Amino acid sequence: MCGIIGFTGYSEAKNVLLEGLEALEYRGYDSAGIAFFHGDRVNTIKTTGKVSSLRDKVLLSAETMSTCGIGHTRWATHGGVTDTNSHPHTFGRVTLIHNGIIENYHELELELADAGKYPVSQTDTEIAAMLIDSLYEGDAIAAIKKAIARLDGAYAFCILFSEEPEVIYCIRNGSPLVACHAKEGSVIASDMVALIKYSREYFVLPELHIARLTKENITVTDLNETVITPKMLYVNWDVTAAQKGGYPHFMLKEIHEQPESLRSTIIPRIKNKQLPDFSADGIPEQIFDGINRVIIAACGTAMHAGLVGKVMMERLLRIPVTVEIASEFRYQDPIIDETTLVITISQSGETADTLAALRLANEHHATTLSVVNVKGSSIARESDYVLYTHAGPEIAVASTKAYTAQLSCLYLIAYHFALIKGTITETECISNIEELQSVIPAVEKTLDLAEDINKICANLKDKEDIFFIGRGLDYALSCEGSIKLKEISYIHSEAYAAGELKHGTLSLVTTGIPVIALATQSGIYNKMISNIKEVRAREAFVILITNGNAKVDSSICDYHITLPELADNMAPFTTAVVLQLLAYYTSVHRGLNVDQPRNLAKSVTVE
């Protein structure tokens, strides 16, 4: 949930750190800080607010010349948003930045207090710094090893020891760290976007391994102090992919990148332009042998992708498919065995609750398949098999292109599984694949509706409540539309299965309240129109979204958005784009920070 950057090398550290923090600000933006060696001591500069505020503060400081330092952007968990609670934290000879949560920090705090050591902040991070310092006897690695034996929770640490100028020590458990060595020196960060300027080759620091960064090299050892050679990975996008490219916000840029991200995710997995093929992903057809149940575990937007996947899979496979909120999954004593396929979905591949769900599935000998966007991420490494969404970096907190790329992977899984299982014929599968490919130009056409949607959103900017309604696949999309709107516009919104309106929800529908009605499924279109008339009778303000050339009585809605005509099963892709644009422009009309909504961060690496 926080941004981490560390650098030691031949360049001016403050420039590397500030540029890295600006690239990572989407991971946390309550406060920011850097610490760096200046001569034989460590200087720290930190502040609440954005990295721009930190940059201003750094420029005012006379002592910033350094070639080694660490930097951090915070998403507050323990302690309020204050300068004191900002990272880095220094205690004695140790300066530390941290992503994660130390669950037993209070117990450690009491123990340290008995030894006469007291924190100045309210953070669990300072307790970790105090603990390491209390165990340090001149050997940094020994102190780190002793400390992590005492820590419960998730953490990624970058640590400076005042007695070792120009050296950074790092360790992680649960929270991500990636690193590279380039001509400028050694760099480590919580996300590849901070490294791409220096190298396209990088490695993921293995869990519970210690990295020692010097300007000459990076050494990685396990807890037995055996040197290991980490697996190098290669990123196939360049630094411009993590820049706005002329768009006012990353979110709008990423909405417009969806045709390309869909193309990159779908087309390489179609054999002879006809049938799904996962051979390049290393997924054998035998993965589906003996599977009689599918569980999809995910959080937030990824979970909503799973709701669509459930509908598609059950229609095609005729076996039970359940969608589980990952944060609840492992506490429910779920029924999992070797006949279960567990699909985990995560943009970052580091979502803590989803990773915990995956580990539980592995313990029960289920077959595990992950859908992630980041190579080498924890979920990817710990799954039996992985399908990468080739969406490129997604910087805005609100997920857009990753969501539709996840949908495309779930559709491909459904078609491939159904063909192998024999529940669809090869001819039917070819037809389905043709329909899936048709979503790419349809999404391009949907983007042409942006200005019309912008004008509609002027009617929503002052509303306090908005409802989304739909049936079947449209209900799954309503859930995603609702979360997208609330997370960046701060308008209270809820999604309801339209057939449930009369079972309580209609009491909330009053004059002028906006209802966004999804009616893209022809088989239940008339039922949906009846539900729309119910809210219209209560004088709701209705925005209707339909697929293709549906005949619509203009009296039942205030605005009608017509999607490019697609097969009903493919409407979620174009519907998703419209809902993303509705959320985006509503937030813009309200004058909010679209890319960095309050209280939220991109990658949820704590439970």
Image (cartoon, rainbow, N blue to C red):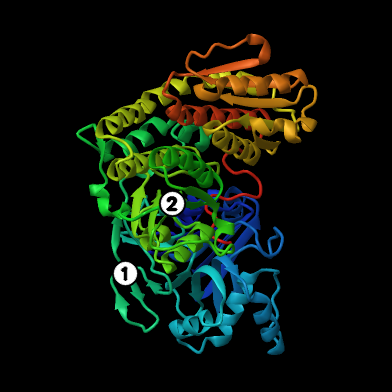
* Depicted 137 relative to depicted 13: above or below: below
Q: At x 42% / y 33%, what residue is drawn?
A: 258
Q: Nearer the viewer, residue 363 or 280?
A: 363
Spatial distance from mark 1 to mark 2, Cα to Cα? 49 Å
* Residue at which label 1 appears: 216
* Residue at which label 2 appears: 294
Q: Nearer the viewer, residue 96 or 339?
A: 339
Q: Is residue 335 visible?
A: yes
Q: Secondary structure at mark 1?
A: loop
Q: Quadrant of residue 261?
A: top left
Q: Secondary structure at mark 2?
A: strand
Does residue 476 appear left or right of residue 269 in this picture? right
Q: At x 60% / y 73%, what residue is drawn?
A: 90
Where the C terminus falls, by quadrant?
A: bottom right
Q: Count residues near mark 1 (Cα–Cα under 10 Å), then give few for <14, some for 14-19, many for 20+.
A: some
Does residue 306 appear left or right of residue 78 in this picture? left
Q: Is residue 22 visible?
A: no
